Image (tube, rainbow, N blue to C red):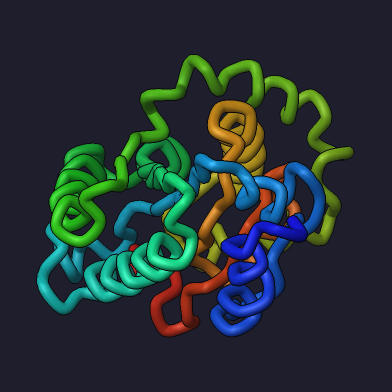
Amino acid sequence: MANDTALQWFQCEFYPQRKTGRAMNFEGPEGVLGRFARSEINLFTPWGPRYDWEERGATIQPGDKEMLLLEFLSRLLSDLRQNMSDREFRWHFLAADLYGVEINGLPPEIVDGYYTSLEQALAAHLPEAKLLRWSAFDDEAAPYRADVRSNFTDEFDRALVARAVRTAEAMGRGGDAKAYLVERLAEARLVNDKWRPVKVSCVGRHKDQGVDGPLPVLYFVPPELHAPWMR
């Protein structure tokens, strides 16, 4: 790192000035710094379904919070590319379609329509990014889920489970809190094995604690743009 001026810029200028929360797994060869030291950097951002679709519909409109967040992320990537020009950045967005349909009971056509709209918005603001659907990895995720389920009480402490249950109850959709926790950790481990990415989170740090496994995570998104799918 001594002669890596781009990485020094990231660590000493960009990260401390831009962060809205302390990163998870910042140090080490498989942490943020280790992965940003590579010539090819994979970024990863999960994106929930729109839960207030009855009020807002399934189509993202100009001025919606989703659009504002994508504009923010586009500027973020532009700054990284300008100051780390020797790196190649790839950005995978992951649509949480299975969460919406199977865990929280949203209509499949609404979830599908929302992510089709998000794909169009991404093409306009972050054309380099790819939107993938978590359902496409369903079979691949099966052994990860099975492993998490078989060790559930060791993987998640009681406070985290209780918090997940309260969140599911507050959403009022009959969601399965334990299934959600299993899915989150299985997803984190699969994604980590598959892409070795750095996650750019769109929620507060407390929302990720205990469910992101080995993923290094950065928090740059301001609170007013958190979780645009929740409004």
Tell me the residue at 39%/53% (across/down).
48
Query: Among all residues in the image, which is located at the extreme right?
Result: 154
Q: State the residue in front, 230 or 171.
A: 230
Q: Position of residue 29 (x, y in %)?
A: 77, 44
Q: Position of residue 79 (x, y in %)?
A: 40, 70
Tell me the residue at 82%/40% (across/down).
155
Whether residue 205 is visible to the viewer of this picture, yes or no, is no
**Vertical comparison of 182 with 59: above or below:** above
Q: State the residue in front, 7 or 45.
A: 7
Q: Is residue 29 left or right of residue 212?
A: right
Q: Is residue 221 left or right of residue 218?
A: left
Tell me the residue at 56%/75% (across/down).
14
Q: Is residue 205 left or right of residue 66?
A: right
Q: Give residue 192's quadrant in the image.
A: top right
Tell me the residue at 31%/47% (across/down).
129
Q: Quadrant of the C terminus?
A: bottom left
